[in-house]
Image: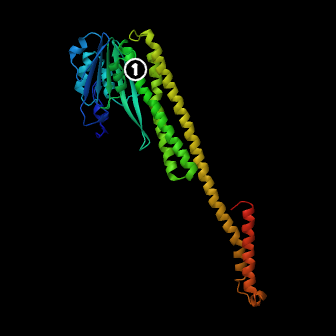
Amino acid sequence: MSRKFRSNTKIRKKGLPPGTLVYTGYRTDKPSTVFTVQIVDDQYREQPYYSPDQRKSKGLVWVDIRSLTETALISRIGDDFRMHPLAQEDVLDTQQRAKMEEFDNGLFVILPSLNFKKETREIVSEQISIFFGKDFLLSFQEDPDDDFAPVRLRALEGIGRLRKKGSDYLAYALMDTIIDGYYEVLDDIQEHLFELEETLHRNGAEPEVKAGIFDLKRAVNEFRFKVLPLRDAATRLYRTESDLVEESNRLYIRDVVDHVAQILDGIDNEGNMLSGLESLYHAEASNRLNNVMRLLTVISTIFIPLSFVAGVYGMNFDNMPELHTRYGYFMVLGGMFVAMVGMLAYFRKKRWI
């Protein structure tokens, strides 16, 4: 697995003019790779490179760039497709929120690809950028791994409408694939929720339960923060008056809007479940503390009268008749024992112990 770390470029971008291309995402040891898909007359062809001649060919051209470390390559491809410099800058500034923007020759969409890392219970985010126009689409994946493999496979095998539709439908298919991954994140978080709930019922308010609740609350908040802007972006894409989105494809984009709304409802539901689980944890911790205090109270109640008797007969007075009684010592011990047993029986009857 390649080592990743954020590049410290925010300071270097300060003072640079708008449209300056500086990559701000994860540095990897893998260079940028380019795959070009051409769909001409219902025929599919994929090549592991890009050349300007491919842009001039007939049919739909899909250029997919994975890993964004080579800014010169991204700039060259963007310029070939007349991609606005501000859009190119947003592609490389990988801490953007989800959005949709309209340009003269294309529509630009940014959305996050999300995964739930089960080992650390955290959300891992990757920025996906899509720029499409008449008969072309550019996709930019921050990670070298291919998130669009299912779409590519469907197009290769001729399944569905990908070979018959235009770039707007391809953009929908890519967005739909990314958003489908959100359902997996929801399921993974819910699975961990159930595990924490079971652990809480089985072992009580243990420290690892509290840590798990905290981690999941942070993950759910991050999940919502990443997905919430996508609702507005998808709605803008659905309502755009651009000729680049065919009327027959607006129903599919509306489906994306519905899926995002479902995801947000699921996030809110898991947030409520976490709040309930946190309340249950605090109630369990309070109940455990009450049990400890009750036990200490019972012990104190038993020993208070015994201590009183011991204190009375421990006073150094000469005129204490019981001190000279032959069986006084055993009588006092017996009385203390009977009192202790009586109190224990009473507490047991009251279910205090």
Please provide percent x and percent y for residue 224.
48, 32
Q: Nearer the viewer, residue 342 or 42?
A: 42
Q: Quadrant of the N terminus?
A: top left
Please provide percent x and percent y for residue 131.
34, 19
Left or right: residue 16 versus residue 290 is: left
Q: Dot 1: what SS? A: helix
Q: Quadrant of the C terminus?
A: bottom right
Please provide percent x and percent y for residue 316.
70, 86
Any part of residue 34 in sight: yes
Q: Residue at x 47, y 40 (%)?
A: 218
Left or right: residue 313 versus residue 173 is: right
Left or right: residue 290 versus residue 9 is: right
Q: Residue furthest right?
A: 321
Label 1 neighbourhood size at 10 Å, few (<14), some (14-19), many (20+)? many
Q: Which residue is mark 1?
A: 173
Q: Residue at x 75, y 75 (%)?
A: 338
Locate residue 299: give its quadrant.
bottom right
Q: Residue at x 25, y 25 (%)?
A: 34
Q: Nearer the viewer, residue 287 or 225?
A: 287
Q: Nearer the viewer, residue 172 or 86?
A: 172
Any part of residue 312 in sight: no
Locate residue 68: give its quadrant.
top left
Q: Nearer the viewer, residue 57 or 28?
A: 57
